[in-house]
Image: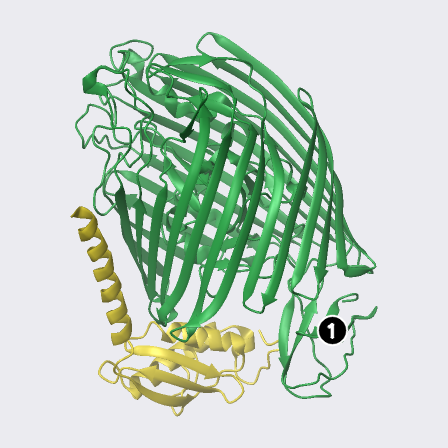
Chain colours: A yellow, B green
Amino acid sequence: MKTLKTISTSLLIMIIMMVSAEKANAQTAEIKIKTSATCDMCKETIEKNLAFEKGIKKSVLDVDTKVLTVTYNPEKTTPEKIRIAISKIGYDADEVPADPKAYKKLDDCCKKGKVCTDGK
Amino acid sequence: MPGANVYWLGTTTGSATDANGMFQVPDPDTLPAKLVVSMVGYAPDTLVVRSAGQTGLRIVLKNSVMLNEVKVEARQSSTMYSTIKPIGTETLGKKELLKAACCNLSESFSTNASVDVAFTDAVSGAKKIQMLGLDGVYTQVLSENMPMLRGLSAAYGLNYIPGTWIENIMVTKGTGSVVNGYESISGQINLEFLKPAEQKKRFFINLYGNHKGRAEANVHAASKLNDKWSTMLFTHASSNTMKQDMNKDGFLDMPLTQQYNAFNRWDYNNQKNFEAQFGVKGLYETRQGGQSRFRYKNDNGTTNAYGIGINTRQLEYFSKTGFMFPSAPYKSVGIQTAGKYQQQDMYFGLRNYKGEQKSFYANLIYANIIRTTDHKYKLGASYMLDAYSERFNDSAFARTESIPGVFAEYTYTHAENFSLVAGVREDHHTAYGFQFTPRLHLRYNPGKKTTLRLSGGRGFRTANVFVENQSVFASSRQVVFREKLRPEIAWNYGVSINQQFKLFSNDAFVNVDFFRTDFQNQVIMDLDQHVNRVVFYNLAGRSYSHSLQVDLGFEPLEEFALKLAYKWYDVKTTYNYELLDKPYVPKHRVMLNMAYSTYMEIWKFDFTTNWFGQSRIPSTVLSPAEYQLPTHSKSYFLLQAQVTKKFRKFELYLGCENILNYTQKNPIVAANDPFGSNFDASMIYAPVDGRVIYAGLRLEIK
């Protein structure tokens, strides 16, 4: 009896985990935002920091075109809020300029006009 | 870099880099094609080339850690089976180690199937590992490829390594490489500590606490002094100060403990041809358990109350130096040295033990190739010195083992899909003369996703009976040595197959392995002969272990990983002319681990179920009826879960071990009469401590 209970508990937890994994992919919208990112290091900084913002599912920066593709939940955030979040990380986002304080803190190679020499 | 191999994947078309590190390869037959760049001492790299006639490719190979085999890092999954290494290795990365936040390495294997965590006794709170159903002492534990956990720390050494200090753990089942010595029998575990030069953040802090009063802090600081020098300081402090007796038998469920542990390492790399690493480590630990009313001052050495205490002190250093030859990068010379002083004082009721070990280790390794990098070899010499001095009650034992040895290992690699490692070593032991250790590993990939492996070899070790079997002293059993004990010698053979495939359009694998260990001599601890005695003698008859493990890993959904393992152990030893199952080793075990993480691992959920089948309990037929135990244990489940939430600057974790609160009923035989002849706190097959809820914080500072 106890064995059965444990097995069913384990299975239940598994199902809950799977369902929540499914649900996480349910409601999504996508936008493309032009940023001032210059290199792979900027890519890491933006993608990592944006993940902590509410409603963000995923973000991928294409370093060559500087375009960031953001997948988000439209019920929890808006494109405006996402642009402001990017600005606060220290980068321009479309028409929203980079927050000067955050920009100052960026690594030298991630500042505008700089070129990263070895891709990192 | 000169001398590196450059070739198209799956073909024999390629070339090598010239003296200036430049290379040219003929265009491949089809595009896009994968270009492989490999070099001894560096991690191989593969890059995709999409157009013909491309020039100006610049390839930077990552320097692998000095004197190591090629290092395979677990970037994707938390645990990885290597398909390239000639010796079958499972790498547990940082991610895997974080699945069970608590605490030291003897506990961090609870989410891994290859290494079992065994319970020892009901009073000391110590945990032991097992591989292939055999005690952890038959597994050689290496610290960055040096045998550091030996002698007095062979059995419980992993208790003294905080999990957060570790970068990754490489687990090899069966026989290991001869380069690391003769001691590995059932497996090899290599621990890689964090490297100062690779730390992105300067400080790391981990705080842990559980509801039973255990508190723990780990603080690391790393600093890159300049291009060449870097250093790192690791510290650990933990304590358990709350007295708990949930089963009301008058004994503490877990002992009161205090541990202070520090490690400082220095790495030097001149970026050309010379590397050096050295470090010092120190440990101080006290454990006190037994009856909750025991007070050391008044009760030690008396029959007022039963107490146990284990005090451990260790001080060690290591150094590693490596010379490379820029004109011939496949050539290198490495020297490893290490020294350790360890002391362990114990009392179990009226029994006393004092042990001291001074050891020194040196290993010289020369690596080169025969004509091409298909044929590599390593030659070397080692020296090991162990001076033991032990006292058990009124008897003193002292011995010095001095073991010089030489070794040779040849590695043949053929076209990516076949490799062979053949090694031999000859050591001379002060007391036991020459010991010859041959070992062989084969790998063959019949297809891109299939890996077959075979291994076989001999291992040899001298036992330290008192420390390795200390649990049994938590009983009234009379200790009897029937004869002079000889070294333990065993042969191990293994076969494994790993198949990777796609399931639910994600990567999946199945791994099946079978190992046999055959003892020629073994130090037998016989608990069956008489319930009031523990008898030690040399093996007379057969002793073997058969182990079959089936692992299945897949991701039914993105970010959701499942690991399922089944293990079958058939471990038998001749006890007093009778072949019996080794006690406390369950025949069947099942493990299920589920891990789910959200994007960028902001949330991480981890859930593990372990099922342990029945195991044999040593005979108690001679006990009075009220103290008799069944012949076999009950099967049971252990569940654990953990949730981690990442914030911008730190992360928090919350977890629960032994969720079902399963404990062994009446774990201590005759707990009401600890100085009587039936008392035994070592008949343990399940947890003594119940459910534990814990929480903690990890913080990184720039």
Residue B347 shown left or right of residue A39 in the figure: left
Q: Quadrant of the N terminus of chain B?
A: bottom right
Q: Which of B443 and B164 is in front in this view?
A: B443
The spot of residue A28 in percent (x, y) is 29, 84
Disc 1 residue crowd, few under 14, some 14–19, many 20+, Cα 10 Å:
few
Task: Kindly tell me whether residue B657 is visible in this rendering.
Answer: no
Residue B589 shown left or right of residue A107 in the figure: left
Residue sitting at 26 percent across and 42 percent down?
B636
Residue B456 shown left or right of residue B374 in the figure: left
Q: Which of A47 and B585 is in front in this view?
A: B585
B367 shown above or below B80: above
B5 shown above or below B580: below
**SS of the residue at dot 1?**
loop
The spot of residue B158 in percent (x, y) is 46, 38
The spot of residue B377 in percent (x, y) is 75, 50
For badge 1, the amino acid type reads Thr
Q: Mark 1 points at which residue?
A: B12
The spot of residue B621 in percent (x, y) is 28, 19
Q: Which of B471 and B166 is in front in this view?
A: B471
Residue B52 shown left or right of residue B461 in the figure: right
Q: How many labels does the image show?
A: 1
B701 shown above or below B468: below
Q: Which of B446 and B48 is in front in this view?
A: B446
For mark 1, name the chain.
B
